[in-house]
Image (cartoon, helix red, strand yellow):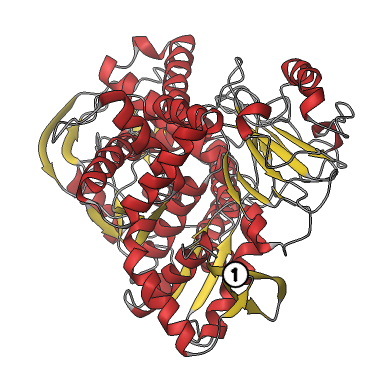
Amino acid sequence: LLDLGLDINHREEFYEIGNFSDSLFSKLDELRIQVAVLSPDIIAIKETWLSQNISDCEVALSGYQLFRRDRTQRQGGGVAMYVKSNFTVCEMTEKISNGIEAIWLKIKTRGSSTIIGESVSRLLAFLGHDILKLNHLGDWGTQFGMLIAHLHDTFKDLGDQPLPVSDLQTFYKASKKRFDEDEEFKKRAYEAVVKLQAHDPLYIRDWNKICDISKREFNEIYRRMDIKDLVPRGESFYQSRMESLVAALQSKNLLENDDGRQILRTDNSQVPLIIVKSDGGFTYDTSDLTAIRQRIQEEGADRIIYVVDSGQSMHFNILFAAAEKCGFLEPHRVTAEHIGFGLVLGEDKKKFKTRSGKTVKLIDLLNEGIERSLNKLKEKGRDKELTPEEQQTAAEAVAYGCIKYADLSHNRNNDYIFSFDKVRHRVLASLPTLPVIRMLDDRGNTAAYLLYAYTRIRSIVRKTGWSPEKLEAVRKSAHVVLNHPSELKLAKTLCRLPEVLYRLQTELLFHKLCDYLYEVSCVFTEFYDSCYCIEQDRKTGKCLPSFSSSSSPSPCFCSFLFPRFLLSYTFILAHGEGRVDEGANFAGLAVPKCRAVWSDIVKIDESRIILCEATATIMKCCFDILGIRTVEKM
């Protein structure tokens, strides 16, 4: 059973590479040749004819994890699966009754959980909810036993010195290779797990060193992606609580003995949750059920949202049903939701990789995005208009923005093809490909275009030369006139934000907010093309600025054009040469005071300038919910 969340109509993903039945061991060389040619991610083989006398090392493939289930009663039979080492695999075979020759794997692919989850939290925080953001980490189990055993072999006893490892992924791959090929090392890795779970001080110390390296790498990514207040909480956090859970379930007679295992059955699935293994150990099911119990009973959650790839949907259906059966998830009081998302694919419609076939690191993706954005700015001649600092700020906003927008601007339930040059959205393989969207193009529904449109609107207001005090006075005194059809259309579009957000908080489909943001930009362009905001001297057409500024922020507040229920939220209108203040809320910017003198301006339409400022405020609000930085110049 492969729990991949793949579209099974995508037939080009699957190959029959040969007949390796009737003794895998004797045909291993032939299999290795086929693997070298095709480099499949997953290989499934039946009729392996393997037995306990043949070790994993004897049938190992370099760069692959091996999972097997041999026939024990007589010769023949057996199944095996090879999965590339860069996949995270959870084996669920224990859930299949003994005697059935089958393997069940859950394979985690690269996804968008952090980007989508951050937008979910930003939206709900903006709407006034108290949010706890958790990063559920797999920091307990066989993988850490492998790492600790490899650490002890490589560095001996480091004492309290930090682990001299800069690339934990490479270190992990080395330990996994030994685990797959060396039976003695595998035994010591399992022993390390036992000592870790028994809280042996030496093993806990080395475990903390490994976790610290991961946290440093995570935090650098989060810093660059503007992700704050994300609490890392590993499975180790729930270890003692798992013991308490088992005792509680036993007292309620909810556990059933199944060949030495303690399982929990639900009414909605034939697949049970394995709470205690036959050797007395806990499973992912145990930690997941314990986690949802802790979040309800200790954190007091009213709504629990799991942002995990769609391949885990069946697991969460069973988990939620089990939590209800145990009595701590009461649907009338607490809701639990699985927010799934599809796969991120490369342009070849396969798993997103580098040209050399390696898994793409997010940090490398961010760096490539900045480099491409800087080159794009130079192509447009902006390096002559902007300072080096302004260029870097703009490049980061565009690069990080386009990566986030790629995840958020399509229906999260579907797969999509990632490329800096283009993104093709796909609903089903049987349906035609939708139009190409160039991510770094400043045209169309892209982050680059929308950020450019936002800076353009801000520049219009700056051209008035108004001081912050003047802008505030106009906001309070000006009578907004909506005589022109384009003015009325823009005002109506802006007033739809509350409706969009109201639906979004239930559906959590952020492509609809992206569509609204793009619509606002298009309607504003139509308005600006039809209606003069600043009338210049027809003879000279000049607007020559002269700025002076102070460092003290002077925001003005606006409740213009919004229905009554949204007036409780503060919208700060930015003006002048702005900067983002860490204390500013979602709707705006804290900016320094500016004074400007513009020549050759004949007339300023105050009503339309207020419309421009309202448009920029709405766009800024949407950008902030999507987690995309804005800039004043680009």
- Please say whether residue 530 is visible from this viewpoint: no
Q: Which residue is mark 1?
A: 273
- Point 35% across, 28% down: residue: 633
| Mark 1 surroundings: few (<14), some (14-19) or many (≥20) residues within 10 A | many
Q: Is residue 207 left or right of residue 50?
A: left
Looking at the rendering, which quadrant does residue 347 occupy? top right
Helix or strand or loop: what does disc 1 sit on?
strand
Residue toward you, 76 or 306 = 76
Along the line of sight, the residue nearer the viewer: 189 or 371: 189
Q: Quadrant of residue 544?
A: top left
Q: Position of residue 65 (x, y in %)?
A: 61, 34
Residue 618 located left or right of residue 237: right
Foreground of the two, 366 or 265:
265
- What residue type is disc 1 on? Leu
Q: What is the tally of numbered marks visible in this picture? A: 1
Residue 126 pos. (x, y %): 37, 62
- Farthest residue, direction bottom: 252
* Residue 355 appears in view: yes
Q: Position of residue 455 (x, y in %)?
A: 40, 34
**Which residue corresponds to the image point at 72% horizontal and 65% vertical from the top-left?**
97
